[in-house]
Amino acid sequence: MRYLTFALAKGRLAKKSLEMFEKVGITCEEMKDKDTRKLIFVNEELKLKFFLAKAGDVPTYVEYGAADIGVVGKDTILEEGRKLFEVMDLGFGKCRMCVCGPESARELLKHHEMIRVASKYPNIAKDYFYNKKHQTVEIIKLNGSVELAPIVNLSEVIVDIVETGSTLRENGLTILEEICPLSARMVVNQVSMKMENERIMKLLNELKTVI
Ligand code: PRP
């Protein structure tokens, strides 16, 4: 039997992903050691390998078959637009992709004005404004703390993830429009889905019972 390899998104989703696998008897003790610098973890008994990657890289590993299976947020799947099968909504990491800004920016969205939109998700922002709203905007790519942009006048609005809403509240910003709901998803390499169908389907059926 060959190894099935899992790429898990680092950060917020990693702990929840491991908890979910534990519920179906898939454990990887070494991975819980916070001080380890190891990158790949093996469960010899079940012939499984796990690695943690930057969220944005998970779809890349899966498309190329370096990982058979990935666990990553829907935001990253939409942004990366990779060729892979999205097979399951895992139900955790729920949040929303929204257009946010100061209340005063609401009018600018209504009247389709030329505005600047800052985001870590330029492709999602582009798709929303160009294809859904038919509004021409300038997209500015940022790498984090995107809420800063409207505060320091880099942009009129942002496209970003809202989970609890506290980052917005604490910075005097608000949700202006909702783009889509998000959550963690399981994705599978298109060839692995055929070659390892039995093992993957068994895993998906087991996961269904605990989600
Ligand atoms: C995310 C997101 C928001 C925040 C939303 O940022 O970009 O800033 O969380 O969560 P809330 O609605 O519960 O306040 P993250 O913490 O991942 O870091 P970043 O700003 O560096 O991207």
Image (tube, grey):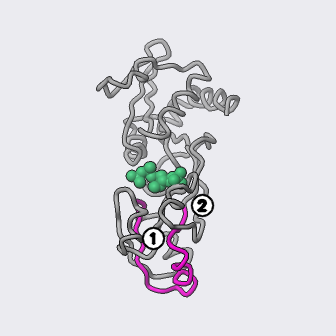
Does 101 appear in magenta?
A: yes
Q: Is mark 2 within 8 Å of ligand 1?
A: no
Is 201 on the left-hand or right-hand side of 82? right
Q: Residues within 10 Å of mark 2 (few under 14, many from 20)?
A: few
Residue at image point 39% right, 74% down: 155
Residue at image point 44% right, 76% down: 156
Where is residue 99 drawn, in percent x and y?
53, 68
Residue at image point 39% right, 30% down: 51
Q: Quadrant of the C terminus?
A: top right
Q: Which residues are magenta?
A: 98-122
Q: Is mark 1 within 8 Å of ligand 1?
A: no
> 184 above or below 140?
above
User: Disc 2 or 1, which lies upstream in sequence?
Assistant: 1
Circle 1: residue type = Lys
Residue at image point 40% right, 68% down: 118
Where is residue 173 drawn, in percent x and y?
51, 67
Task: Work out whether residue 93 or residue 170 is closer to the camera in this orientation and state it.
Answer: 170
Which residue matches tag 2?
Answer: 180
Circle 2: residue type = Cys
User: For the residue labelled by badge 1, is the local secondary structure a helix, a strand or a loop?
Assistant: helix
Q: Residues within 10 Å of mark 1 (few under 14, many from 20)?
A: many
Residue at the left extreme of this rendering: 37
- Marks 2 and 1 sit apart, C-alpha to C-alpha, by 14 Å
Query: Residue 67: which numbered mark, if any?
Result: none
Does residue 93 appear in this view? yes
Does residue 76 appear in this view? no
Which residue matches tag 1?
Answer: 126
Where is residue 66 drawn, in percent x and y?
37, 36
Where is residue 119 drawn, in percent x and y?
41, 64
Does 210 appear in magenta?
A: no
Task: Work out whether residue 190 or residue 147 is closer to the camera in this orientation and state it.
Answer: 147
> 92 above or below 81?
above
